[in-house]
Image (tube, helix red, strand yellow):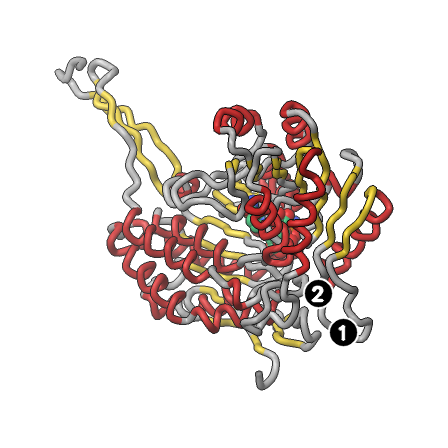
Amino acid sequence: MKGPIETQLFINNKLVPASDNATFELFSPHTGDLVAKVAEATLDDVNTAVDAAQAAFPAWSALSPQQRGAPLKKMGELVVSEKDELAQLDAIAMGRPVSTYIDSHYAATHFNYFAEAAYPQGHTSLNTPGFLNMSLRQPFGVVAIIIPWNAPLVFFSKKVAPAVAAGNCVVVKTSEKAPLTPWKVSQWIEKCGFPPGVINVLSGHGQVSGQALAEHMKIRALSFTGSTRTGRAIQIASAKSNLKKVVFELGGKSPALIFDDADIEQAAKETENSINWNSGQTCMANSRIYVQASIKDKFIEAFSKHARSRKLGDPTSKETNHGPQADKVQHETVKKYIVIGKQEAGSTIDTGAEANSDSKSLLVHPVIFTDVAEDSRIAKEEIFGPVVLINTFTTEEEAIQKANDTEFGLYAALYTKDLERAVRVGKKLESGMVGINCTSPTGCWDLPFGGWKGSGTGRESLLDSMDHYLEQKSLYVRVSGIGGL
Ligand code: NAD
């Protein structure tokens, strides 16, 4: 790389600096080098982007679904043909190993699906004699989209594609920790054929630009993926401004239950991958594992073997499958929880040595805590790092009670060969998604993705997402002589 990348905002189909020329610096979490100077959007920039989106809305929403779909299709092609560059950008920004980069495929699926499938429909009713009644589904106008850093292109595509396919115009705010892939994608928006103002992309922090979007009076809907703490702040900002509709995909503290008749090797391999994939920075990672007491030692041995075989290192190398934590803040947070865990847990299994003190890389070896008090901080709080607790249970009731004893409810998993138990327990778990003999990130394209309790209010999928971006209207049409059915 020649020197730091300099990024811009993308407003009204133009790459522009922040209105006050402010930038912030982004450092590689592996080398510590300055990799980018990123434009920091101001309040003026937010207002300009919202005005551009509002001006674009009448013409964009008046197009046919095929016309709105054509540029989405082109974007679907570009995110795949440029996948190596996108993978490199996330690797240098937030340490995601290029060997784990599935985001282009994920994004292309969303751009392609919504390019073809955006035919919003209401329904009709003859159930009121003298009337032909109908409901209409119409776009909101300007929609704000705020995304996190752990898989930026995934969240960009799963929200932007359905929102614009439904006829809305959007202002996206990217994460300060991983702004480079959305910035790269913003450079393709005009060449794909989107008219000015349909997709605007801002980089910046929660303060000022995120908060400004949440409070904006011209924004009528906001889709957010990120922490439960920020979701709460956005909910309050929405309530204090114009009660915009908010859709939330939030944090997790997901349980996995391993019964004594399970395939222990499969359960150990998959639960280890779930918690340590993306260096533990996954919302649905099974960070709490409950093993039936009789198989505890066998399970922990198999789990530890997989954790020890992780290839930590340079995220731009194809050999690495475990990169550094995203930035110094994440690194400090994870290290802090490891210190707390060592005080709280009955025992600790470190799966590797601490990094040399002269290493600039923010790598953290996976850590396993066992015999942890259920009310301890590491059992209750989302750590967002390669840190798992493995506790035991004896009865099915105890397993369910421990799994549900949390304010989160994103993804729960259970492993057993007893199908009746699987269904019985699966039904009782307080969670938006339940894996039976599989765990996160296993999912599917066409069933609702989202959480119960503090893990969110939204359900996203190819089939569900467009609903978030459409208002409903009932139209009562008196028709003389029409009678009833
Ligand atoms: P975060 O909440 O710190 O930040 C998310 C986004 O919100 C960023 O763009 C940030 O700049 C912005 N933001 C911060 N303060 C804001 C404010 N007051 N108003 C408006 N915007 C604001 O989360 P993060 O650290 O980027 O991501 C990690 C979190 O996201 C974890 O809790 C994880 O579980 C969650 N997550 C959830 C899902 C899901 O689908 N449920 C997926 C990925 C990540």
431 versus 333 height, above or below: above
**x and y percentages locating residue 273 in the rendered image:** 58, 52
Foreground residue among 307 and 237: 307
Say if residue 391 shows up in the picture.
yes
Q: Secondary structure at mark 2?
A: loop
Residue at (22% x, 19% y) in the render: 126
Mark 1 in CB contact with mark 2 (< 8 angstroms): yes
Give the amino acid type for the residue marked by disc 2 in the picture: Leu
55 displayed left or right of 101: left
Foreground residue among 371 and 89: 371
For the residues labelled 1 and 2, the Cα–Cα distance comes to 9 Å
Give the amino acid type for the residue marked by disc 1 in the picture: Ser
Residue at (57% x, 33% y) in the render: 261
User: Which residue in the rendered view is the most extreme toward the right?
Assistant: 343
**x and y percentages locating residue 191 in the rendered image:** 35, 70
189 displayed left or right of 156: left
**x and y percentages locating residue 185 in the rendered image:** 45, 66
Total labels: the figure holds 2
Say if residue 244 shows up in the picture.
no
Q: Which residue is mark 2?
A: 363
Question: Splitting the image into 4 quarters, where does residue 7 fall?
Answer: bottom right
Label 2 crowd (10 A; few <14 / some 14-19 / many >=20) = many
Foreground residue among 137 and 188: 188
39 versus 476 height, above or below: below
In which quadrant of the rendered image does the N terminus lie?
Answer: bottom right
**x and y percentages locating residue 471 in the rendered image:** 39, 37
Residue at (57% x, 39% y) in the render: 410
Foreground residue among 164 and 273: 273
Q: Which residue is mark 1?
A: 359
426 displayed left or right of 232: left
